[in-house]
Amino acid sequence: MPDEAWEELRAAGFLHAAREAHTKATLAVFGGLSRGDGFTDRSFGFAAYDVLASQLDRVFAAGDRLAGRVTRDDLNGSPGWRYGRYRVLLKRHEFGAVHAVRWDRDSPTKQAVARQSYAADPQLTLDVGLPSAADTPGMTTLVLAHSASEDPLELELFLGLPRLNADGGPAWWWIERLADEALGPDPRRKLVESTLPLWTDDEADVPVRLRARGAHDARTGTETA
């Protein structure tokens, strides 16, 4: 399951776009809010969540590779994006504590997501009365967990399938960090076509006119970009 979901979203450029959005959102929030003006960790948290959602909308709508293939697919008011058979929701966690998330203490929607059936534990089902996280047959809802520290500036971004951990067990069935070594080259970036050489042996020599010694050149040079 993690290999399939990760590879499909990575190969499409979805994960690269998500990391780009997270970087832009983090820099915008830390650059726009000041603790000296009274902004608290709570303020930063709300802003980071909202700005990241806006940045995700932007990067998924830009370019030829993802535009039209990623659609906004919220779940009970929780921002979400769908690509193929995967829906991805946001979850902010305390920096360095992504494995300490307690889904059983989260919103009913996040609890429902954490109760999705999983091949490793097929007896898991959604509780009656909780909003459904599997309202589309064959679709899996994943979570994009994000966080950042201001000083020093560090970013954390993970993709995972949450596990309801009221039993004190792990918070994730699987989780992967969106790091350079894991993501690899960005498939959204088209390979730069090799340029032709400036000259070849087959081209005719460019005529050169020598200027007579002492001649005055009244022309002025221009600067080009």
Image: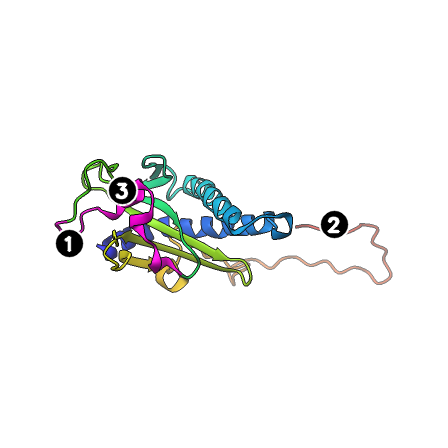
Is residue 3 left or right of 225 when viewed as pictured? left
Q: Residue at x 31, y 44 (%)?
A: 110
The answer to which image quadrant residue 180 occupies is bottom left
Residue 85 in the image: x percent, y percent?
24, 43
- Where does label 2 land, which residue? 222
Assess disc 3: are there few (<14), some (14-19) or many (≥20) residues with their C-alpha within 10 Å of its C-alpha.
few
Above or below, 176 against 86 in this view is below
Q: Using the image, tell me which numbered label, if any, was put on residue 121.
A: 1
Amino acid at circle 1:
Asp
Question: Circle 2 — which element?
Answer: loop
- Residue behind mark 3: 84
Residue 135 lies in the magenta stretch: no
Image quarter hosting the N terminus: bottom left
Instruction: Identify whether 152 is placed above or below 1.
Output: below
Could you give the CA–CA distance between mark 2 and mark 3, rounded to whole angstroms? 53 Å
Q: Earlier in the sequence, mark 1 or mark 3?
A: 3
In the image, which residues are magenta? 97-123
Disc 3 on helix, strand or loop? loop
Whichever of callouts 1 and 2 sits on the residue coming sooner in the sequence is 1
**Mark 1–mark 3 distance (CA, rounded to whole Å):** 24 Å
* Between marks 2 and 3 in the image, the one whose residue lies nearer the viewer: 3
Residue 218 located left or right of residue 33: right
| Amino acid marked by disc 2 | Thr
Residue 41, x across and y down, in percent:
52, 51
**Quadrant in the rendering for residue 59:** top left
Quick check: is 101 in the magenta stretch?
A: yes
Mark 1 or mark 2, which is nearer to you? 1
- Asked whether residue 33 is in view, the answer is yes
Left/right placement of residue 90 relative to residue 135 reads: right
Regarding residue 13, the answer to whether it shows in the image is no
Residue at 18%, 47% in the rendered image: 117
